[in-house]
Image (tube, rainbow, N blue to C red):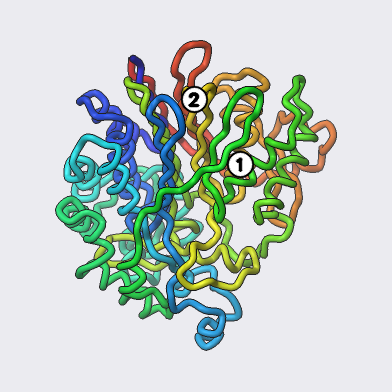
């Protein structure tokens, strides 16, 4: 039976394909690919981030894994004010929550995989130790973030060496991350959540005015979530529950009449209402609460020859997370608590903060239709709705759906359009607000189309997709 992989980087795709060729399943391949992304996409994801995953075993309901971290137990509104902050800052130690990225992959592998953690980590460790070539997205993100990163003792030497951002085609070696991966291979997630590395993460965050503690790391565990669903045109769409943006996708689709030709003004309005209902209304988001970001999340999709499917999304939230490097992990820690500032919410110590990252999955009569996801903050639910409409109502295959122009409801509520979108006739001014290709999200999809498995990757951010016959 055919297998397929779609990731944001060809090196991760190749690593996943090699696992599948060697007899591993979709979870084995996805976890291996994700560790590679932790090395080659430090602007988007890493040991210091977190994420979510769906695993579908070919029939019935998917398993939903919540690897997001909680707000530190000491992070209260009063404590923030004592530190001189009226709200959670956009960057720095006070924006950090517990990093659950490694625990998510470890849990997925132990519950649904077949290979050992050392085997899953090995390709990533080799890239970190021997070096990897910088791709365009990392180079452009390093350039945007250079003014802040250059002074960081960890991230500066790695990505702004000699005061100049790494260039596309240059080679980065990260021996500290390689050693961290050795520890993860030997000790699992406890290498990061306890011991010297965990203590170093806490020390670095607190040195920068953060409130993460050893107790926060110790209480972290990957949770099994209860996904939400909606029936849409004889398909079941699966999403993560609150506090993610997942309910926004479901609400939007629930309010749509599944008919053709598609009324794109209705899709736009349903998307606006869905995001508002989920608590992520772009018009109400504090625009200054977070620096502009386009490379802050990565998504990958894998389906193996036995029908197991994985939808995996992982993130450090902002570009290079909190702009706070931890020497012992060779990379940044995430700034997920910044969502509280964006949504004008006070922190709830020990609770999960609002989360933008959402993996998606579609079934029909219990059988897999597709796994899909999009990197890009508030673009994630918007693009998922559009992809689902394109594939289910317009009958497009995954790659054709990914390639079609998108709309975006931006911070502040303004509409932006890619050239050629159906809404251009009724909203011509929106064409002038385009944030560029990366601003419309980066999608990956693996799904069935006309009896064949198809893998789709987004050229907007140099994605990579391969079908293995």
- The mark closer to the camera, 1 or 2, is 2
Which quadrant holds residue 269? top right
Q: Is residue 330 above or below residue 461?
A: below
Disc 1 to disc 2, C-alpha distance? 31 Å
Query: Does any portion of residue 300 appear in the rendered image?
Result: no
Which residue corresponds to the image point at 82% horizontal and 37% vertical from the top-left? 428
As drawn, the residue found furthest toward the left would be 186
Q: In the picture, which quadrant includes the C terminus?
A: top left
Picture coordinates of residue 247, whole percent (x, y):
61, 46
Picture coordinates of residue 14, whole percent (x, y):
30, 31
Q: Mark 2 points at which residue?
A: 366
Q: Residues within 10 Å of mark 1 (few under 14, many from 20)?
A: many
Q: In the picture, which quadrant includes the N terminus?
A: top left
Q: Element type at marker 2? A: loop
- Indicate left or right for 112 with 382 as reference: left
Looking at the image, which is closer to me, 157 or 290?
Answer: 290
Give the label on residue 440, or none: 1
Q: Do the residues labelled 1 and 2 touch (CB within 8 Å)?
A: no
Which residue corresponds to the image point at 60% horizontal and 68% vertical from the top-left? 341
Picture coordinates of residue 336, whole percent (x, y):
48, 62
Which residue corresponds to the image point at 52% horizontal and 62% vertical from the top-left? 353
Name the N-terminal-most of marks 1 and 2: 2
- Indicate left or right for 298 with 217 as reference: right
Q: Is residue 132 above or below residue 425?
A: below
Query: Does any portion of residue 414 appear in the rendered image?
Result: yes
Q: In this view, does 65 lie above or below 345?
A: above
């Amino acid at each position: 039976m055919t297998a397929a992989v779609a990731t944001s980087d060809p090196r991760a795709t190749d690593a996943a394909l090699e696992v599948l060729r060697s007899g591993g399943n979709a979870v084995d391949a996805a976890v291996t690919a994700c560790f590679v992304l932790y090395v080659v996409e430090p602007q988007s994801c890493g040991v210091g981030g977190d994420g979510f995953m769906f695993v579908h075993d070919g029939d019935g309901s998917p398993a939903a894994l919540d690897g997001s971290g909680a707000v530190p137990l000491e992070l209260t509104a009063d404590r923030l004010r004592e530190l001189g902050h009226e709200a959670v800052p956009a960057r720095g130690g006070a924006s950090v929550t517990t990093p659950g990225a490694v625990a998510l992959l470890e849990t997925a592998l132990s519950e649904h995989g077949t290979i050992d953690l050392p085997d899953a980590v090995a390709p990533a460790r080799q890239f970190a130790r021997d070096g990897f070539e910088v791709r365009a997205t990392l180079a452009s993100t390093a350039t945007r973030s250079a003014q802040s990163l250059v002074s960081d003792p960890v991230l500066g030497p790695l990505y702004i060496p000699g005061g100049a951002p790494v260039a596309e085609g240059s080679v980065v070696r990260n021996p500290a991350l390689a050693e961290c991966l050795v520890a993860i291979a030997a000790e699992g997630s406890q290498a990061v959540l306890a011991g010297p590395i965990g203590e170093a993460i806490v020390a670095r965050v607190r040195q920068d005015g953060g409130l993460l503690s050893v107790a926060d790391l110790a209480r972290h565990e990957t949770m099994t979530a209860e996904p939400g669903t909606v029936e849409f045109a004889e398909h079941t769409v699966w999403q993560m529950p609150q506090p993610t943006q997942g309910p926004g996708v479901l609400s939007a689709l629930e309010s749509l009449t599944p008919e053709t030709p598609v009324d794109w003004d209705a899709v736009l309005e349903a998307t606006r209402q869905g995001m508002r209902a989920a608590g992520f209304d772009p018009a109400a988001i504090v625009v200054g609460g977070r620096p502009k970001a386009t490379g802050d999340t990565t998504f990958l999709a894998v389906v193996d020859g036995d029908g197991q499917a994985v939808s995996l999304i992982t993130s450090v939230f902002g570009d290079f997370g909190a702009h706070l490097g931890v020497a012992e992990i060779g990379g940044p820690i995430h700034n997920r608590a910044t969502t509280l500032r964006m949504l004008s919410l006070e922190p709830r110590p020990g609770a999960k903060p609002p989360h933008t990252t959402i993996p998606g999955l579609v079934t029909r009569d219990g059988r897999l239709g597709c796994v899909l996801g999009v990197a890009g903050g508030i673009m994630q639910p918007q693009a998922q709705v559009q992809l689902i409409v394109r594939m289910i109502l317009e009958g497009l295959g995954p790659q054709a759906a990914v390639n079609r122009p998108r709309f975006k409801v931006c911070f502040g509520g303004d509409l932006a359009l890619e050239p050629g979108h159906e809404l251009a006739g009724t909203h011509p001014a929106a064409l002038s607000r385009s944030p560029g290709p990366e601003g419309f999200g980066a999608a990956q999809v693996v799904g069935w189309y006309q009896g064949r498995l198809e893998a789709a990757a987004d050229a907007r951010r140099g994605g990579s997709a391969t079908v293995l016959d």
